[in-house]
Amino acid sequence: MRYLKKLAAGVLASSLSFAAAAQTLVVGDQSFNTRAVMEAAGVLEGLPYTLEWKQFTAGSPVAEALNVGSLDIGLLGDAPPLFLGALGAPIKVIAVTRQNLGGVAILARKDSDIHSLQDLRGKRAAIWKGSWSQQLLFAALDKAGVPRDSLDLRYLSALDASHALDGGSVDVIATWEPYVTQQERQGARVLATAEGLIPAQSFVVANAKSVDDKRAQISDFLQRLKKARDWTLSDPANTQAYADAWAKRTHADSEIARVWFARARTDVAALDPQVITNAQKTVDFFAGLGLIKSYPAASLFDTSFAAALLPAAAQAQQAEVIRTAQAHTE
């Protein structure tokens, strides 16, 4: 109870700071994924600030926008912010987004003679440098005892890699959703997934100045995002509604979206020691390739937003403590 009172005091102080803080929160989203789930869950009603969305098609430009201060927060995969962290960028990781790791996979053409990782020697593989794609392929090859240099590597974006696999100009790709689901529906063969090989984490990242200037808004946004993700996971029908909302916004195939989101079961959570340990492994991996310098990944993380990401039941109890605290101040 003592902890909840302290928590309530902190949240109450944050809520009272809205008037003094800037009233617009600029959020970097990728292809409407976050906006779609929050709109589908109905958690954006009654915002005490203006929410401005900016849409991107990849994580690297989200990271760069955070770096220069044109975004307050952004949602993206782990590699871009970890790369910027090596350069001392003014950003902080404030939450982690997790998904089923089956959605990050190595795929071979359905009509190929590739049936296992051992068959990849001499084959043409498409990956995206400095991403889950490269990390997964190399980790899988290392575990299987297949030399990395025994493959003919082509560096392509996830979209171009998927097209290359369709057209036969590469034999295998390492990729993520929605390309995994798309390729599986076309008969592509899964050789390995990220499960047990790489963390494949995603992060909510904030500009460091925004952490100081817009803490109340960021906390509120995270709380609403947590509610939206909990809503999606609570009922398959909600997941389907989210998939349909996303497909409508992006003009994508709703059936692919339904399969993808049902498998992904994406959630957002507070940072914990394992998240930071996993991030360090990713930093060390890319440092080993000479793509970044090694550094203590923990320096990039800010764990102070944990209260905003409490499960719904704890949030309800917290809200009651806040109401009691407010009543005593009146």
Image: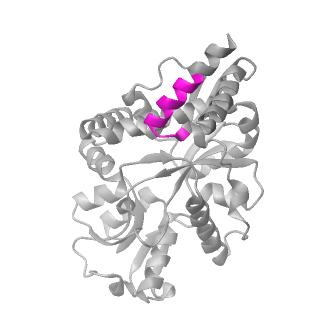
Residue at position x 50%, y 46% from top? 57
List x then y, in percent, for residue 146.
43, 88
Q: Quadrant of the C terminus?
A: top right
**Which residues fall within the magenta stretch?**
309-322
Q: Quadrant of the N terminus?
A: top right
What is the quadrant of residue 106 in the picture? bottom left
* Rendered residue at 29%/60% (across/down): 183
Whether residue 320 is in magenta: the answer is yes
Return the residue nearer the eye: 148 or 90: 90
Q: Position of residue 105 (x, y in %)?
A: 38, 66
Instruction: Report the front residue among 131 and 100.
Output: 100
Could you tell whether 192 is left or right of 134 in the image?
left
Q: Position of residue 310 (x, y in %)?
A: 51, 40
Residue 198's place in the image compared with 67, above or below, is below
Inspect this view and state whether residue 42 appears: yes
User: Magenta segment: does it hold 300?
Assistant: no
Residue at image location 58% in from the left, 55% down from the top: 272
Front one among 27 and 237: 237
Which residue is found at the position 26% from the left and 80% from the top? Answer: 115
Does 18 sit left or right of 59 as displayed?
right
